[in-house]
Image: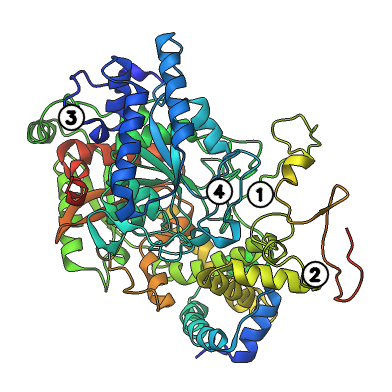
Amino acid sequence: MNLGRHLHSEKLNKPLHELTLVELAHALQSDQTTSVAVTEAYLDRIEKYDERINSYVYVNAEGARAAAQASDQRRKKDETRGILDGIPYNLKDVYATKGNPTTASSKMLDGWIAPYNATVYTILEDAGAVLLGKTNTDEFTMGVSTETSYQGVTRNPWDLERVSGGSSGGPAASVAAQLAVFSIGTDTGGSIRQPAAFCGVTGVRPTYGRISRFGEIAMASSLDQTGPITRTAEDAAILTQILSGSDPLDATSSPMIAPLAEDSALTLPGTVPVGASTDKRREEMRELKPLIGLKIGIAKEYFGEGLQPEVEVQVKQAIQELVGLGASTIEVSLPAVPHALAAYYIIAPAEVSSNMARYDGIRFGHSIEKTDPHTKRGLHDSYVQSRSTGLGHEVQRRMMLGSYVLSAGHFDAYYQQAEAVRQTVQSQFAEVFETVDVLLAPVSPHTAFKVGEKISDPLAMYKEDILTVPLNIGGIPGMSIPCGLVNNLPVGLQIMAARGDEVTMFRTARAYQLITDFHQQFAQMIAPS
Amino acid sequence: MSDITRETITHLSSLNRLHVDTATAERLTDQLGTIVAYIGQLQTVEVSPETRSRVAMGVSHLANVLAEDVVREPEDPASLTFADAASQIPRVYAGSIQVRAVLAGQEESA
C-alpha cells in the first residue's frame, strides 16, 4: 500500500476521534500524534459514552495499550507496517482472537476464549492495527436490531430510544459514536449495510468469497461475508483491499475473484483536492463530470410498497447528485428480487440448523456439565439441557425453521424451490449488470425503529431485510453510505455492483462523498453532557 | 395456512436437541406457522425448467472449490495442539474428552 497516495496534506485540525483512517494515518506518519495518544483517547471515550450505547461487549484495554506502544516504537525505528499501523479498531464479537473472549453475544459461548486467530484478525494484527475490543451483535448474528444479543441491545447514537440495527449493530454504533476508527463486521443478509444505514456510517459487504471467513463464527456459510464499517468509502476501499485474498484455511475465499488493484477504487479523473470545501468540490466536480460513462441502474423492485416516502426522496436526491457528475440512469427490472427474502429465510435457517449442531456443551462453551456437574444424566439429556439453556429464542426459532424446511416431505417444496429462486436471482443480477455498472437503491425501507417495537413479531423483523437480502442471495458486492437525514435519523444509499466489481462500487461511493458531507455528520448525543 | 402444529414443534425441538416448555411451544406454533406461511409463497414462483432441473440434479453454474486434505504437524500455526483444543472442555478424563453415557444409567465413558 502506497501510503502517500492516500494522505492529505493539511495539518491536523480536528479532535483525534473525528479523524478518518486516512487522516489519522497521515497524522501518525507526520508525527502530529502517536498511536498511544489516539488509543488512550478512544479508551477514554469508550469509558465515557459506551455505557449508554452498549456497543462494546469486551474492551481490550491492556492489549490495545501494548499494541499502540509497539506501533509507536516501530514508527520511531522507521519500521512502520503501513497505513493501518497504530490505528485503533474493533471486531464484531464473532471473530476468534487467541486469548480473548469470543462469544457471538450468546450465553452459549459466554466466557469462551478462542484458542486460535481468525485470518481477518491475523491480517490486521500483522498490519499493526490496534484492537480496542469486541462489539455487540445479535446472538450468533441472527437478528436485525441487536435485541437478540445475550449482552443486551446496542442503542443508536443518533437516538438512544432506537435500535442501531443488526446484526452488526455494535460495530456500526461504535463507529458512529466515534468509539473506534473502523470496525469489521459480517453481512449474511444485510448485517453490515442495514446498521450502517441506521447509524449513518459506511458499511461494505464485499463479493462472497473475497475475504476469508476462517475463524469467523458461522451463521449461514453460503451467505456469510466479512466487511468493513468505516466513516468514508475511501477508508472502506483501503480495508477491503487489505483484507482481500485467497486463504488456504477457507476454501470459499476464492482466488477466482479479480483482485482489487492498489488505489484503483479511489481513482477519480479530475478529482479536486480533498482539502477543499464540499461546496467547492461539488462545483468543480460538476464541471469535470468524473462519472461520465457510469450507468446507474434503477430497479423498480427496490422502490415498492412500504418504502418510507422521505427515505425515497433522500435516495433519489443522491442519485441526482451522481447524475450531476456525469452518470446516466437506466430503469431495469429484477422480477425475482421480491422473492429473495422468502428464499433467504429458507436457505439461511437450513444452514443455521446445521452450523448450530456443534454447540453441544461437550467440547467448549456453555455446558450443563459446568453448571450442574453432579446430577446423573445421559448424553442426550446433557445435550438438550446445555443447548436449551445456552441458546436464545431467535436462534432456537431459526434452527427449528431450518430443520422444518429440510425435513422429508418439505425439502423439495421449500429448500429446492428456494435454491431455484436463488439461481434465478443470480442470473437476473448478472443480466442486469451487462447493461448497467451499478444499481442504486435504499438500504432499508425506513430509518431506525424503536427498541422493542418489533421484537415480539419475528416475521416483521425478518421483513426488515427485504432490500438487503437480494444482494446476498445474488452473491454480489454492495455497500451503504449515508445520504441524508429524516427527522434527524440517517438514511442509507445502497450501491450494488457486479460480482467482483468492487472498484466501480467504491468509485461511485467516493464520488458521492466528495461532493456531500452526510458522512461527516455525527450523532449529537455523543457531545459531552 | 401452514401445517405447523404443537406436534410439529415437539418433533422439531427433538431434532434440534432442545427442550421446549408448553408456553414456548404454544408461542412457537404461532410464530413458525406465520413464518412458514410467508416463505410458502415461494412455491408459487415460476422458475425456468432448466433452473429447476439444475437444482434437482445438484448442478450449479458455481463450482465448488475444495482444498486438499492436509495433515498438519502440531507445531504448524494452522494446527491446534490437544492442550489448546481441550483447554475449555467441561469434562476431561485421562487426557480425553469425557462424555456422559449414551444411555442414561450406563457407566460413563471417555
Say if labels 1 and 4 share a chain: no
* Viewport quadrant of the N terminus of chain A: top left
Instruction: Say few, some or many: other residues with alpha carbon within 10 Å of mark 2 (under 14 / 14 to 19 / 20 or more).
Output: some
Q: Position of residue A83 (x, y in %)?
A: 39, 23
Dots 3 and 1: beta carbons under 8 Å? no
Dots 4 and 2: beta carbons under 8 Å? no
- Residue type of the residue flagged with mark 1: Asn
Look at the numbered disc 2 and give the secondary structure of its residue.
Answer: helix
* Residue A379 badge: 2
Instruction: Say few, some or many: other residues with alpha carbon within 10 Å of mark 4 (under 14 / 14 to 19 / 20 or more).
Output: many
Instruction: Look at 21% across and 68% down and name the residue there.
Output: A308
Say if labels 3 and 2 share a chain: yes
Instruction: Say few, some or many: other residues with alpha carbon within 10 Å of mark 1 (under 14 / 14 to 19 / 20 or more).
Output: few
Q: Is residue A141 above or below residue A459?
A: above
* Residue A14 badge: 3
- Residue type of the residue flagged with mark 2: Leu
Tag 1 residue: B64
Say if labels 4 and 3 share a chain: yes
